[in-house]
Image (cartoon, rainbow, N blue to C red):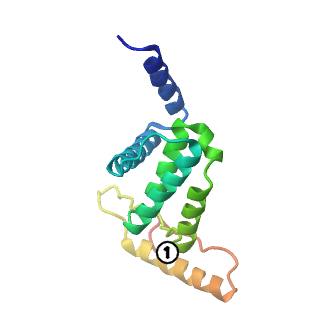
Amino acid sequence: MTQVGDKDEKTKKKLLNANYAPSTVKRYDGAVEKFKEWCEENKIKDTTDTELDRIVSDYVAFLYDEDCGRSLAEMTMSGIVMYIPEMKDQWKLTLKLVNGWRRMEPSEQHMMLSLHKTKSGRNKSVQVIDENVIKLVKWRMSLVKGSARNPPRATFGRAPR
């Protein structure tokens, strides 16, 4: 027979998950599961909110040392907040560590490229993309020099002239 407490926890989890997109819940759950596995390997038991901040900060340091990627640390924090919303204001040390990591290793910006197919089924000329990359690089270089005004217009989807 299911205990009332177990049923309440399942209902709470379901309602809390409804605040997030299913793909987000899946990513956060995966990150939290990895954190739980790390806790088991290191024989860490249930803790208070203050202890949880210290333990997650240890985990963040472990992820950094193992070169696991900052996104896993951020998803772990967000996943814990998803299930323990009051933790959002409790991150003291952990948040400082993640912010320090972010400053030491800023995210790379990636340009989104899409290739459109023509009616014949062939991709439009990659030359269009190459020209846009060259324009963007020249514009970014002019930013460094301080002479840039507006970003270049992309010609994606149009044939080169």
Identity of the residue drawn at 45% across and 44% down: 28
Residue assigned mark 1: 132
Determine whether 94 is above or below 19 in the image. Answer: below
Determine whether 7 is above or below 90 in the image. Answer: above
Of residues 129 and 159, the one drawn nearer to the viewer in this rendering: 129
Numbered disc 1: secondary structure:
helix
**Residue 41: image location, x then y, percent:** 32, 50
Q: Is residue 113 visible?
A: no
Of residues 46 and 127, the one drawn nearer to the viewer in this rendering: 46
Question: Which residue is farthest bottom?
Answer: 145
The number of numbered discs placed on residues in the rendered structure image is: 1
Give the class, few, some or many, for how many residues have Cα within 10 Å of label 1's Cα (few <14, many ≥20): some
**Residue 47: image location, x then y, percent:** 50, 42
Question: Which residue is farthest left?
Answer: 121
Identity of the residue drawn at 53% across and 31% down: 16
Identity of the residue drawn at 51% across and 43% down: 80
**Residue 65: image location, x then y, percent:** 40, 68
Which amino acid type is shown beneath numbered disc 1?
Answer: Asn
Q: Is residue 108 visible?
A: yes
**Residue 85: image location, x then y, percent:** 59, 38
Identity of the residue drawn at 59% across and 43% down: 87
Determine whether 83 is above or below 8 in the image. Answer: below
